[in-house]
Amino acid sequence: MMLTALGLMSGTSLDGVDVALIETDGRQVKAFGPTGYRPYTEGERSLLRQALVEAAHLPQRDARPGILRQAEQAVTIAHAEAVAAFTAQNRITAQDIDIVGFHGQTVLHRPERRLTVQIGDAPALAKAIHVPVMHDFRAADVEAGGQGAPFVPVYHRALAQSLNREGPIVVVNVGGVSNITYIDGADTLIACDTGPGNALLDDFMYREMHQPFDTEGRFAAQGRPDEGWIAQALRLPFFAKPPPKSLDRNDFASLRLGAMPPADGAATLTAFTAAAIARIVPLLPKRPRSWIIAGGGASNLTMLRMLRERLAPATVEPAERLGWASDAIEAQAFGFLAARGLKGLPLSYPATTGVAIPMTGGVIARP
């Protein structure tokens, strides 16, 4: 049975709330609906940055001390506003939507401690939007010993299967953290985080240039990457580990660039993201033939150029070129995962998160 699922995603880059509607049975995507976006205000971003700092010391996953309670309320309100604006603009009623997939805002991801925390009050959101809300997607996987990330691979596979092209295909999502899904036919699905996505670069641009990100990679294009620094950073143990593996947004926050012009700093961090993605190739079963880049990094032209250089002779193309809504893929994915969760289908697998057996997940909050 086909369901109309609304997916909501607020990523580690802290930019805002993505909204996307799809029709799916949890296995295939029958149709893409409209997409929307509600940016966080500067005040909300500041609050979330404080929450990330405070969350580092959380004793348990349901604790909300200090600023975290305030941040959770802000996240919930932002999502409710995003849904209200989206449904009004597209003349959709609550009755038109079967299920909402609500990821929440990740503030801590420590799978080695069997701990992953996404803030957002799903029962309050369900009451505000009058639709059942599935949330807490990652917890069951982490409790069972999985990495709890990445969670979008099953959706990437559904998209890739519609392309009818020879594999292996890798879909890369460049959000705050970068992750890949390796797809080779219907059976082989491997996924992992590869390293930093936009988080280090965005934090650098905010700190040095008072800008939220490097638009189209224009600033990095003016600089020269420090290849020695990148080679040194790639010696960190994470990069040699085989998949599956996952990261917290702040795992590389301790890396320091040293004295260099700001444009060189931006170029170095952009190249580091590209080099970290390329570093996964020797750890995959076969060399990929094609790479599809989604997420915020897909609109960074300098990053795309650097990926083409490092991944040649494979093709590298932005997801938009295939008709995919690059910025909305993760939101669509959580609508898709909500439909899978409703049907008890697996959301994660041993080769995507390292969990011992395929795991379903998600908790439903009803209005």
Image (tube, rainbow, N blue to C red):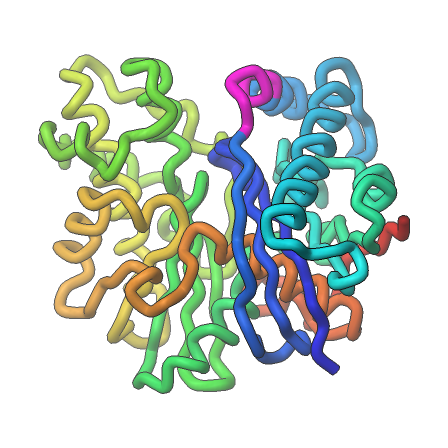
Foreground pick, 75 / 252:
75
Q: Quadrant of residue 213?
A: top left
Q: Quadrant of residue 223?
A: top left
Q: Which SS does the magenta portion mostly show?
A: helix
Count of marks placed on residues = 0
Residue closest to the far right: 367
Q: Is residue 179 left or right of residue 303?
A: right
Res 351 visible:
no
In the picture, the quarter occupied by the N terminus is: bottom right
Q: Is residue 179 left or right of residue 55?
A: left
Determine the residue positioned at 68% across, 56% down.
92
Determine the residue positioned at 75% across, 49% down.
136
Q: Is residue 7 left or right of residue 123?
A: left
Foreground pick, 346 / 294:
294
Res 54 visible:
yes
Determine the residue positioned at 19% across, 69% down.
314
Determine the residue positioned at 69% across, 42% down.
84
Give above or below for 327 relative to 316.
above
Residue 59: percent from left, percent from top:
78, 27
Give above or below for 316 relative to 225.
below
Residue closest to the far front: 91
Residue 287: percent from left, percent from top:
26, 73
Foreground pick, 85 / 323:
85
Q: Is residue 322 magenta?
A: no
Residue 269: percent from left, percent from top:
26, 33
Q: Which residues are magenta?
A: 40-47
Residue 33: percent from left, percent from top:
56, 64
